Image: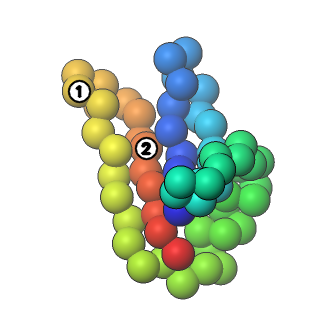
Amino acid sequence: MYSATANKSGRMQYHKVKPGESKLRISRSEFISTYNSAQIVSLRPIQSPGNDSEFQLEFFI
């Protein structure tokens, strides 16, 4: 799974997650490259209550 989430200050953070094993922070370019080239099985938007300006998501490959 890959995730793009905003921290408390609003800065985006990108992670590669192996559930139950590890959560590795990755670069924005690695996230975008994987998003554009991998076969995505599922995409899940992450909603922040009361904040319409952040676009956060997770995708599964």
Q: CA distance from mark 2 to mark 1?
A: 12 Å
Left or right: residue 14 versus residue 29 is left
The residue positioned 30% from the left and 25% from the top of the image is 51
Left or right: residue 24 versus residue 9 is right
The residue positioned 61% from the left and 79% from the top of the image is 38
Left or right: residue 59 versus residue 30 is left
Seen as rendered, the residue at the extreme left is 50
Q: Which mark is residue 49?
A: 1
Q: What secondary structure is found at the residue carrying circle 1?
A: loop
Q: How many marks?
A: 2
Residue 48, given in percent of the width and then of the height, sits at 30, 31
Picture quarter containing residue 7? top right
- When the figure is inspected, residue 19 is found, relative to residue 49, above or below; the finding is below
Give the camera-side residue of 60 and 19: 19
Is residue 2 something one can see in this rendering? no
Residue 59, given in percent of the width and then of the height, sits at 46, 63
Q: Which mark is residue 56?
A: 2
Seen as rendered, the residue at the extreme top is 9
- When the figure is inspected, residue 31 is found, relative to residue 9, above or below; the finding is below
Q: What secondary structure is found at the residue carrying circle 2?
A: strand
Q: Which of marks 1 and 2 precedes in the sequence? A: 1
Seen as rendered, the residue at the extreme bottom is 39
For badge 2, the amino acid type reads: Gln
Give the camera-side residue of 23 and 46: 23
- When the figure is inspected, residue 4 is found, relative to residue 58, above or below; the finding is above
For badge 1, the amino acid type reads: Pro
Circle 2 crowding by C-alpha within 10 Å: few under 14, some 14–19, many from 20: some
The residue positioned 62% from the left and 54% from the top of the image is 21
Residue 19, given in percent of the width and then of the height, sits at 52, 57
The residue positioned 65% from the left and 79% from the top of the image is 37
Is residue 53 something one can see in this rendering? yes
Circle 1 crowding by C-alpha within 10 Å: few under 14, some 14–19, many from 20: few
